[in-house]
Image (spheres, rainbow, N blue to C red):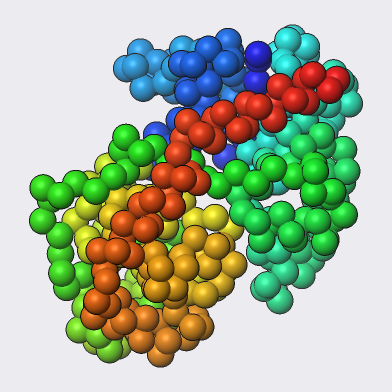
Amino acid sequence: MVLSLFFTRNVSLKLWLDQGLFDREKLIYEEYLKQGRCKQIYWLTYGSNDSRLAAELKNDNKLHPGIIVIGMPKLFNFPKVGSYIYSFFIPFLYPKIFQQTNILKTNQMDGSWCGVFAKWLYNKPLVVRTGYSISQLLCNNRSSITRCTTYKIIEKYVYKFGDLAIVSSYHNRKYIEEMHGVERKDILVLYNYINLDVFFPRNEIKKYTNRVLYVGRLNPEKNLFNLIEAISNTGLILDVYGTGEQPERQLREFATECNAAVNFYGVVHNNLLSAVYNQYSYYVLPSYHEGMPKTLLEAMSSGCLCIGTDVPGINEIIVDGVNGILSRSTSSHDICKALQRALYVKNKDVLIQNGIRMIKNRCALNSIVQKEFKAFTGLLNAG
């Protein structure tokens, strides 16, 4: 089988590397090649130097030789609209690639229209994979109404012509069923995969007892200001890993105003995160909404007691008092109470073990590979 993956518009191989995502994102595709399920995989990216970068990674044995990276030509390398224009040209620029491709797959909804065009041109099955529904995210923000409407139209169009939708959560499946009329039989729910050979408890590492870990984007939907305010009332130290839309300076200033002990460590590459998780007893995710948060799954798999807000995407993973602790709301007051509950919970080890067991059952990399590949072969046999 030959698979062609359309990267999210404006996302490059370099960006994956810079944001520490490369080691995690490549796993499923390298697994296909190692298991002999695919003989070749194409990555169609938006970086003008990605092909050269891929060659360097292969020379260093950091990228499987069966993954062929097709970067964006420098002709399209200009601000704001260059990646949009290129996304429409992709299906026409690489006919030899798409003619030998068996399955077309998107990585997110932004830019997925080029997958639809390629399907039309080359009569290949299209798998529309999304980690979250971008319209649902935008529609929760009043300042994004125009973009929300635009992406609702894009999603409806792409799902109409796609052959299979892959989503990472059951609440997302429900959303696209109700919003876009996609039939349940055409939606496959696959939780984000976790490499259990990397993310597991390491009992030899001594854990902090007075620190709480947050790993993720510094974005408004992550509710970090309320988390910082909550931390100020617990006597705990918050360690933050990640970057994002919100300037770190603003969060630092707010922490000072609240007299909260907060440390910022920036981006850590995914292959180093396991050691980070294993230093902490507690991991917190205070978001207003989520798709299927990978860092929460990684932290739970690594043996952290996980605390989250009772919102879709988090409450699909954390069952309050069973495998973690849920805050009743996204307010700083309720997050503070949830953190205090976590500190004094009597059956902490039971909750942690239940979390590890759940990740093994639902998120193991090899299991996800098998389920997705079975869906691919089903599409090919149906054709």
Q: Is residue 191 above or below residue 67?
A: below
Please give the name of the residue rendered at 83% of the width and 61% of the height, measured from the top-left corner. Answer: 179
* Left or right: 24 in relation to 236: right
| Quadrant placement of the N terminus | top right
Q: What residue is shown at x 36% (from left), y 22% (from top)?
A: 62
**Residue located at (67% from left, 73% from top):** 141
Q: Where is residue 183 drawn, in percent x and y? A: 84, 48
Q: Position of residue 5 (x, y in %)?
A: 64, 28
Quarter occupied by residue 337: bottom left
Instruction: Specify whether 54 is left or right of 157.
Output: left
Q: Is residue 356 visible?
A: yes
Instruction: In the rendered view, tell whether residue 320 sits above or below residue 199.
Output: below
Q: Is residue 327 left or right of residue 118?
A: left
Q: How many labels were placed on the picture?
A: 0
Residue 248 image-quadrant placement:
bottom left
Residue at 27% in and 77% down: 345
Residue 326 drawn at (x, y percent): 44, 75
Q: Quadrant of the C terminus?
A: top right
Left or right relative to 235: residue 13: right
Residues 243 and 33: in front is 33
Residue 377, position as x, y percentages in the image: 71, 22
Is residue 113 at all visible to an observer of this figure? no
Q: Which of the two residues, 184 or 286, is positioned nearer the viewer here?
A: 184
